[in-house]
Amino acid sequence: MAARREVQRQAMMDSQREMDIQREVDMRRLQEAEMEQRTQRAVDEAMKKAAAENAVPQQGAAVVVSPPPQQIYHTPSPMPMQMQSPPGQSYTLAPNMMPGIPPEQMARVPSPHPPPYSSEYLPQDRPKSAQSVGSAAPATESNVRYCTECGFGCQIGDKFCSRCGAKQAS
């Protein structure tokens, strides 16, 4: 009889130990889930705050639409990539992105080729040593046609520009 009671007491202690272990495991899982939720909320709030701070300087410049943040579970969330500008310098837009200002009014970059009417390419302005250089005979005022691409003075009969190779109007 004493042996039976000892076996029952031992079985009861084992089951009590198993229940305690199971309770502790459940409590750890619950704490981990709560911690993960808090971390996710903190990350979401930080992303919203960063987006709001970044949107304030840009309100006058342009409207930026960002995709909603991804919901990732049981993995660490990646850090959002942000374009950085030097300290004290605001964001700048490309000239064709300026609202309300037509592109014609923006500062233009000079073309690497002078316009066709430029005196730089008139035959009389060429140095004497360069008059004989080229594949064709020197162009005179009466038979000159200026290339629409580079402005070079080509002969009227030429099908292609002798400088840039662009097709000439017939």
Image (cartoon, helix red, strand yellow):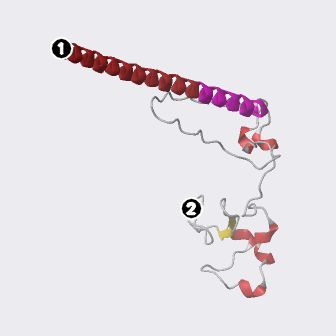
Say if the magenta span includes residue 44.
yes
- Say which residue label 1 marks: 4
Q: What amino acid is labelled 1 in the image?
A: Arg
Q: Magenta residues, as a range?
A: 41-58
Taking the spot 68% from the left edge, 31% from the top edge, the residue there is 51
**Residue occupying image coordinates x 79% and y 64%:** 118
- Closer-to-camera residue (56/21): 21
The percent position of residue 49, horizontal first and vertical second, equals 70, 28
- Image quadrant where residue 65 sits: top right
- Residue 141: x and y in percent read 75, 71
List the single residue furthest toward the bottom. 129
Q: Quadrant of residue 115?
A: bottom right
Q: Could you tell which of marks 2 and 1 lies nearer the N-terminus?
A: 1
Residue 110 is situated, as x and y percent measured from the top left of the image, at 77, 58
For the residues labelled 2 and 1, the Cα–Cα distance comes to 110 Å
In the rendered image, which residue does mark 2 sit on? 167
Foreground pick, 75 / 140: 75
